[in-house]
Amino acid sequence: MRKLTPILATALALSLPAFANANGFDSNLASTITGPIKVEVLVSEDLAHRAENLPKKLSDRGSGRLNGSFSNNGHYGQKDIDRLVEEMNEELADDFEKYGIASADNAPTLLRVTLEMAKPNRPTFNQLSEDVSLSFQSFGIGGAEITAEVISAGGDVLGTMEYDYYSSLANRPIAPNAVGTWTDADRSISRFSKKASKKLAALGAGGNS
């Protein structure tokens, strides 16, 4: 997939509450947007911490394998966090192109996307090395929560967008062996990207200022 140019590297942002009860896309963005957009993809403080650590809150650590609480929802590994950021960048690049939205590093409007939380369907390589009781055959529900702000050149927040999706026991695949480590999280990223790009395009993004 083609990447946005330039792509800003992973950064930290304050975390909003993770694992919202309601799934789906929501936005209060209503301002007309013209010209290209600069894209910045961040990782929440909580998710970044879980790259090499257990969650700070004991209540976020789980032991239910069926619910995907691999290694107590921590020790994902930095490579896996970076992979999720790259996936978001690539999805946005593709969808921006699809909806005719230009991106530029010097664009006056900033789309700041934050990966608030993600849960894998299978243990990551780092989790497998941390917990010898796990195997790649271990399977659970996964997903991701994403938020975004659209910020003007003057620093004003023009509006926000958010999307979260976590699979459930009811929609587990008949053939779980076909599911990869981050299948549900990737699905959430892809859906957010499409919905956010469509929203921006509807408000004039990509047009002449």
Image (cartoon, rainbow, N blue to C red):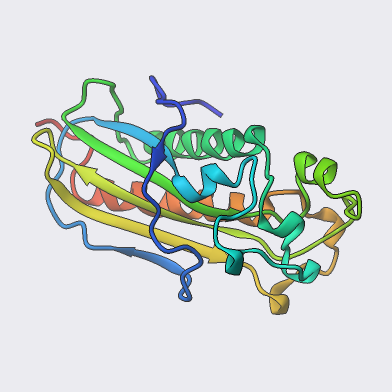
The residue depicted at 21 percent of the width and 57 percent of the height is 29
* Above or below: residue 134 compared with residue 155: below
Please state, as top left, top right, bottom left or bottom right, where the C terminus lies in the image: top left
Q: Residue at x 82, y 54 (%)?
A: 178
Q: Nearer the viewer, residue 109 or 117?
A: 117
Left or right: 13 with respect to 58?
Answer: left
Vertical order, 168 against 13 (above or below): below
- Please name whichever residue, 63 or 199, is drawn nearer the observer in this view of the structure: 63
Q: Where residue 198 sits: x, y (%)?
A: 34, 51
Which residue corresponds to the image point at 53% horizontal and 64% vertical from the top-left? Answer: 165
Count the marks: 0
Residue nearest the observer in this picture, 152 or 127:
127
Q: Is residue 203 above or below residue 153?
A: below
* Residue 108 locus on image (x, y percent): 16, 29
Residue, x 65% and y 40% (percent of image)?
Answer: 52
Horizontal relation, residue 209 to residue 174: left or right: left
Which image quadrant: the N terminus? top right
Residue 17 at what x, y percent from top left?
A: 42, 64
Residue 131, horizontal then vertical, whole percent: 84, 50
Q: Quadrant of residue 86?
A: top right
Residue 129 figure quarter: top right
Quarter-of-image position of residue 187:
bottom right
- In the image: residue 71, left or right of residue 136: left
